[in-house]
Amino acid sequence: MKRSSLAFTLCLMALIAIQGIAQSTKDAMALFHEIDHTAAPNTLVNKEKDKGWRILFDGKTTNGWHGYNLKIFPGCWIIEDGAFTMTSKGGTEDQDIITNRKYRNFALSIDYKLTKGANSGIIYQIAEDPKYKFPYETGPEFQVIDHENWPDKLEDWQINGANYAMYPPIAHPYKPVGEWNHLLLVVQGNDVTQVLNGVIVVHYIKNSEEWLKLRNSGKWSNFPDWGKFDDGYISLQNHGTKVWYRNIKIKEL
């Protein structure tokens, strides 16, 4: 191939990629605006119902959730003021809860609130199997953390809004400790977009050259099944610090 033809092909591929990213982020923001952010927590308004959203947590019961690799809902989680929260202490990984159903293509909307120095996350595309101890061994994570008060130095891919151990957030729209944040996670095939408080913070293409390089050169190189599954359960992580989750809604795409 002549250099001019090669250059044209590369430019065309780059343009297509840029257009794909633009469409993905546009679609994610359209989904964000389908949510009524003024409605009472743990409820669906007619507009949301009409768009295909449904509640994953009613604010009163544990219906639809169980402990990872358990048949029951673990006692280290409680419902407090209409929100899931954990009672574990110590800052180490404890029992995570996961959805009863697997999901493949979806938009997930959640409100969360942190205490000082809290650490948690939304993990997805999880495989549930006794050979794994924790959901993070198989699924990527939308990082939820008060990094400003974390006692140790953190990498940029560890701060609030990051795709943990992969992609740092490109913006930092998180709210102070004690205030409710809103996250939106959109998974459409290999295309993933993370939105925090109405701002795109991460966009990536799973199994792309860039994704594979990051996956194989960092933390996940020690976890052979991480990122392997295209559908799976969704988890709220219990890291031994207190975080509240409410208003959990999902739309299958």
Image: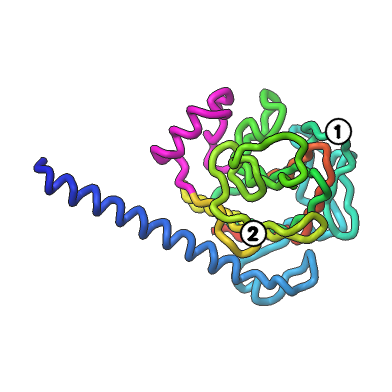
| Residue drawn 48% across the image and 61% down it | 25
Residue 116, how many percent across, how many down? 82, 47
| Residue drawn 24% across the image and 54% down it | 12
- Measured along the vertical axis of the image, is residue 105 above or below residue 220? below
Residue that protrudes farthest toward the left in the picture: 2
Q: Which residues are magenta?
A: 204-233
Q: Is residue 160 visible?
A: yes
Q: Secondary structure at mark 1?
A: loop
Residue 122, how many percent across, how many down? 68, 46
The residue closer to the viewer here, 124 or 169, is 169
Residue tagged by mark 2?
173
The numbered mark at residue 49 is none
The residue closer to the viewer here, 194 or 35, is 194
Residue that protrudes farthest toward the bottom in the picture: 46
The residue closer to the viewer here, 153 or 250, is 153
Q: Residues within 10 Å of mark 1 (few under 14, many from 20)?
A: few
Amino acid on which the number 1 mark rests in the picture: Gly
Residue tagged by mark 1?
90
Applied colour scheme: rainbow
| Mark 1 vs 2, N-terminal side | 1
Residue 47, how many percent across, how many down? 65, 76
Whole-number angstrom distance, CA of label 1 to CA of label 2: 28 Å
Can residue 209 be found in the magenta stretch? yes
Amino acid on which the number 2 mark rests in the picture: Pro
Can residue 206 be found in the magenta stretch? yes
Quadrant assignment, res 158: top right
| Residue drawn 79% across the image and 31% down it | 92
Residue 184, how many percent across, how many down? 62, 58
The reply, left or right, for residue 125 in relation to residue 147 is left
Q: Secondary structure at mark 2?
A: loop
